[in-house]
Image (tube, rainbow, N blue to C red):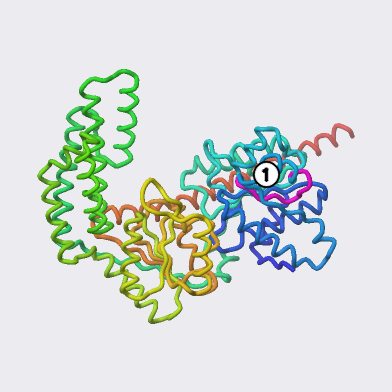
Amino acid sequence: MLTPREYQQKIFETAVKKNTLVVLPTGLGKTLIALLLAKERLNKFPNSKIVFLAPTRPLVEQHFSYFTKNLEKEEDEKAKEKWNTHIFTGKIMPKKRKEIWKDANLIFSTPQCIENDLQNGLIDLSNVSLLIEDECHRCLKSYSYVYVAKEYLQQSKNARLLGLTASPNTDLALIKQICENLGIEAVEIRTRESEDVKQYLQKLTKNIYYVDLLPEMQAVATLLHSLYEKKIEELKNRKLLFSRTTKIMLLELQARLRVALSTGQNDFNVLRGISVCAQAIKIGHAVDLIQTQGIIQTITYLQDMIEQDRQGKSKAVKQIVGSREFQDSFIILTKLIQEGKEHPKFEKLVEVIDEQIINKKNARIIIFAQYRDTVTKIREILEKKNLSSAIFVGQAKKKGSGLNQKEQQEIIENFKKGKLNALISTSIGEEGLDIPEVDLVIFYEPIPSAIRKIQRTGRTARLNEGEVVFLITKGTRDETYYWAAHNKEKKMYSSLEKIKEGLDGKQKESKFKETKEVKQKGLSEF
């Protein structure tokens, strides 16, 4: 028998009456609310269907498993029998999916599958009484969630929509767009500080550790930054840039110049601008690597550029590699590697992990890092400490190795069973996946996204006390990104409250109008 917590019951009661956006931290039972609502809709509309969408196949399988496990606990045998659950994936042939659709009343799928079947006329949504979209912050632009939700709200005879997320967005206009795309009528928000949630969570400690770059690393950063400034100055002299520059501004400029080139504006200023812009982006990335990542990561990146130059692939790279600043930087980095030096973050990382293991021998730790080279380096360091760990990354990109979904699942199972102390993960470990609660979350570098910060932090302090650690190199992008995410998170909750108030206000206004009309009608009849 499912027993919802007080806040889950309140959210469920709202979702029964209105299309609802549920914003709830990771691990606080969004899926239970979905299950309660699914049962309610099927009781109300016994011959209808329910569709549960999630962005990835592992997530789809996770939700399917949760539902089937809990539905099997139903004491009423007749209640058990009425559930006909199925998973839709691209591996099932469309013809077969069409047949399954006829008999199934609870379908778990990626949105792309449903979108394709709708467009090919294999299914329709008229008899779907509940559509659930998990990780619904993706319901923007051309993502399949948008198309499916729109079709559902148009086709369904008894539409009810539930959007689930830990963090929708930080931009008020985008949150409004998500709500509009989902036909949202109510917003239910809970944070770790919400009164009806607090009692179910454990103490969360946040620690920020600042490190200083080694003098030699600072020298490399200064050399590369001076080269970067030369490129920015040239772009300004060519009247292509006018103000303080960010990486996003450079990428936007690059895109505009390429469009200009494609439309026939192939004068020297455009051609040179494209080259200098590419150089600035590459050099800026090298500066970020030495400041926030490590020595081996930086020299690997410089070696890649040397190889590209050797192969004559890029004039932009040729100019970087030929510069005095690049060559001096390479010499310093080579010396640092010969001396066995590391970024100070690694030393602090080991110190933090050691302290955790002393306090709790079987501690579970997840370390998030932006780049695969950094993930690999952290694994090497943990192996030297005889700490059982695994790299947890997405599927293979252009170069290097990745993990397929089966390998990812095996790693998660080993982590659950205590065979591994630590997961070292890229962004793949942030969203939705059924990774067990951990004792310690480490950000090797801060990220500017509030959504991703919330997802990472949500991995700890649910059933047991937890700690979140941020490693920050002083005076670098790390500090900027930390505060950017912090401020965006505050802005997000403020925006959600505004939308919630707006929707509540509309509901009250609508009820007032109805009451007024009824009263006026009664008087005229009299």
Magenta highlight on residue 142? no
Badge 1 density bin: few <14, some 14–19, many ≥20, Cα 10 Å = some
Magenta range is 101-110
Residue 105 shown in magenta: yes
Give the camera-side residue of 41 and 343.
343
The C terminus: image quadrant? top right
Query: What is the tally of numbered marks visible in this picture?
Result: 1
On the rendered image, what quadrant is the N terminus found in?
Answer: bottom right
- Closer-to-camera residue (131/519): 131
In the rendered structure, the answer to whether residue 517 lies left or right of residue 234 reads: right
For the residue pair 520 and 96, the one nearer the viewer reads as: 96
Toward which corner of the image does residue 35 lie, by quadrant? bottom right
Q: Residue at x 53, y 36 (%)?
A: 142
* Residue 163, image x, y percentages: 61, 49
Compared across the picture, whether 30 is left or right of 223 comes to: right
Residue 175 visible in the picture:
yes
Question: Which residue is at the front of the view, 451 or 376?
Answer: 376
Residue farthest top in this picture: 264
The residue depicted at 33 percent of the width and 34 percent of the height is 252
Q: Position of residue 403 (x, y in %)?
A: 46, 56
According to the image, label 1 marks what residue? 507
Is 505 on the left or on the right of 369, as rendered? right
Q: Position of residue 23 (x, y in %)?
A: 57, 54
The residue under the point 52% across, 55% down is 405
